[in-house]
């Protein structure tokens, strides 16, 4: 199985980090060779699954290199614009586009509890290995947001709640 991470911002700083955390390949999606690199890395078989937190224009870059029967998990709009679905390409590849939003689940207490329990279990089992970049107090929430907006973060930003 191939695992890929894409990275546009300050890629040189992040390549070693991403490989340390399990990425077999890191592709700079800001360059125009994305589709060619995917086909080269996969021996021309293309992508079976895509986890897309970006949307447009990233969505357009991988459509032509999907395998037949592939699945796209679309779970974010980091680009700031909604994707424009190319239905014809999905039909030709018999691919599935599965949109996801956490906002569909956070209002349901049992969903939140199941999610927190699942993540906690996987962390305790060593399967999930979160990398903490920086910890802020609750009073520093604005500073945490500003830090996140610098796009130079490697790992998670934690805001500790007062108890």
Image (spheres, helix red, strand yellow):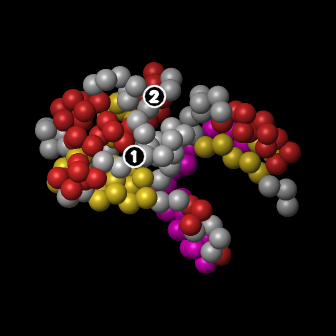
Magenta-span inclusion, residue 112:
yes
- Residue 155 visible, this orientation: yes
Estimate how packed mark 1 is, as few (under 14), some (14 to 19) or many (20 or more) residues with alpha carbons within 10 Å: few
In the rendered structure, find residue 155 and report the number of the disc placed on it.
Answer: none
What segment is highlighted magenta in the picture?
110-135
Please provide percent x and percent y for residue 143: 78, 36
* Picture quadrant of residue 137: top right
Estimate how packed mark 2 is, as few (under 14), some (14 to 19) or many (20 or more) residues with alpha carbons within 10 Å: few
Give the mark count. 2
Question: Could you say which is closer to the camera, residue 158 or residue 27?
Answer: 27
Please provide percent x and percent y for residue 148: 66, 36
Q: Is residue 75 left or right of residue 148?
A: left
Q: Are marks 2 and 1 in contact (CB under 8 Å)?
A: no
Q: Is residue 47 left or right of residue 153?
A: left
Residue beneath label 1, please? 84
In what quadrant of the picture does the C terminus appear? bottom right
Measuring 51% from the left and 41% from the top, which residue is drawn there?
A: 81
Magenta-span inclusion, residue 36:
no
Q: Is residue 82 left or right of residue 27?
A: right
Q: Closer to the N terminus: mark 2 or mark 1?
A: 2
* Picture quadrant of residue 120: bottom right
Q: Residue furthest left?
A: 44
Question: Could you say which is closer to the camera, residue 113 or residue 64?
Answer: 64
Measuring 40% from the left and 25% from the top, which residue is drawn there?
A: 30
Measuring 34% from the left and 53% from the top, which residue is drawn there?
A: 72
Marks 2/1: CA–CA distance: 21 Å
Measuring 55% from the left and 48% from the top, which residue is drawn there?
A: 130
Q: Is residue 21 left or right of residue 48?
A: right
Question: Could you say which is closer to the camera, residue 151 or residue 122?
Answer: 151
Residue 49 to residue 154: above or below: below
Please provide percent x and percent y for residue 21: 44, 41
Residue beneath label 2, please? 8
């Amino acid at each position: 199985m191939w695992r890929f991470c894409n990275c546009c911002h300050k890629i040189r700083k992040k390549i070693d980090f991403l490989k340390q955390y399990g990425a077999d390949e890191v592709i700079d999606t800001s360059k125009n060779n994305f589709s060619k690199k995917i086909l080269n890395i996969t021996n021309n078989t293309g992508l079976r699954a895509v986890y897309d937190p970006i949307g447009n224009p990233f969505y357009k870059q991988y459509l032509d290199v999907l395998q037949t029967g592939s699945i796209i998990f679309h779970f974010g709009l980091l680009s700031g614009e909604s994707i424009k679905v190319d239905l014809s390409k999905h039909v030709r590849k018999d691919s599935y586009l599965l949109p996801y939003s956490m906002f569909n689940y956070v209002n349901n207490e049992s969903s939140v509890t199941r999610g927190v329990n699942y993540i906690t279990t996987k962390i305790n089992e060593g399967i999930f290995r979160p990398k903490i970049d920086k910890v802020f107090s609750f009073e520093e929430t604005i500073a945490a947001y500003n830090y996140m907006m610098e796009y130079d973060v490697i790992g998670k930003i934690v805001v500790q709640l007062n108890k």
